[in-house]
Image (tube, rainbow, N blue to C red):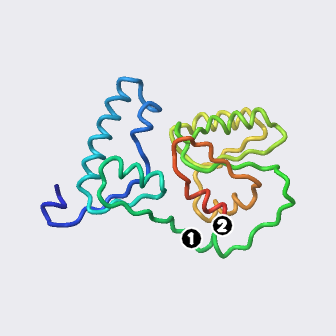
Amino acid sequence: WHARRHRARLIMGLHTHFETQAELYWNRVLGGINRAYFNFSNGLLLKEAALVLANSEHMVETAKKMGARDVELIGAPLPTEFVEKPLPSSDGSIKRVLFAGRLAAEKNVEYVLEAAERLPHLEFSIAGDGPLRALVEGKARELSNLRYLGWLNRGDMLEVMDACDVLVLPSSLETFGTIALEAMV
C-alpha cells in the first residue's frame, strides 16, 4: 500500500519460508492459523512486488509458486577477514565439533545435544542465542564435552570456526546458511 501510494517499486527479500515452521512453534490449531496468515501476507507481498530477491534456488522456486512475477537469486556477502585470513592447519582428524546459529526448533539443536551425549570423546561447542538457550545452557552444565559460547561477533566467530574441525548444521527446513559459506571459505 505504501509503495503504491508513493509510486515506488516494492522489492521483497525472501529468505525463510515461515509457513513450513508454523507447527514447530504452535499446536495444530494455532499453527494452522499462523500458516494461513503467512500464506496470505507473504502471498500478497510476493504478488505485488516488482522484484523478489531470494538466497537459494529452493527459495526462488518457492517465491514463484507463491505468485512472484520476477525473482532473482542473490549471493551472501562475506566479510573480507573470512577471505583474507590464512586457513588453519589440520591433520584431518575430527576432535572438535561446532554448531553456530539461532538456538531454535527449526535448527534441530537437539541433534547436536544428543550427539554430544553419545560421543563423549569429541568436544562440542554451540554458539548463538535464541529460544532454546536455556536447554543448551543446561546440557552444557551436565556434559563435560559441551561448551555453550553464547552469541559471538564475526571476529570471534572466525576464531571459533578455525579452532574446530567440523561445523554441523542439522536444520532440515532451512536453506544453505551464511555460516556454512563462511566456514567453507
Are dots 2 and 1 in contact, CB under 8 Å?
A: no
Q: Considering the numbered disc 1 on the image, is that residue within a helix, a strand or a loop?
A: loop
Q: Which residue is mark 1?
A: 79
Q: Please tell me which residue lies in front, 43 or 121.
A: 43
Percent x, y for residue 134? Answer: 58, 35
> How many numbered circles does the render carry?
2
User: Would residue 65 appear left or right of 92 to someone viewing this image?
Assistant: left
Amino acid at circle 2:
Val
Residue located farthest toward the left when viewing the structure as drawn? 5
Percent x, y for residue 125? Answer: 70, 47
Q: Please tell me which residue lies in front, 14 or 118.
A: 14
Badge 1 density bin: few <14, some 14–19, many ≥20, Cα 10 Å: few
Percent x, y for residue 161? Answer: 69, 58
Image quarter in which the N terminus is found: bottom left
User: Would residue 35 appear left or right of 159 to someone viewing this image?
Assistant: left
Q: Residue at x 57, y 39 (%)?
A: 133
Image quarter in which the C terminus is found: bottom right
Residue 127 vertical position relative to residue 69 in the rendered view, above or below: above
The quarter of the displayed image where residue 148 is located: top right
Q: Nearer the viewer, mark 2 or mark 1?
A: 2
Comes first in the chain, label 2 or label 1: 1
Q: Which residue is mark 2?
A: 185
Q: Considering the numbered disc 2 on the image, is that residue within a helix, a strand or a loop?
A: loop
Q: Please tell me which residue lies in front, 114 or 181.
A: 181
Amino acid at circle 1:
Pro
Which numbered disc covers residue 117?
Answer: none
CA gap between label 2 and label 1 equals: 11 Å
Q: Residue at x 43, y 48 (%)?
A: 16
Q: Please tell me which residue lies in front, 8 or 54.
A: 54
The quarter of the displayed image where residue 78 is located: bottom right
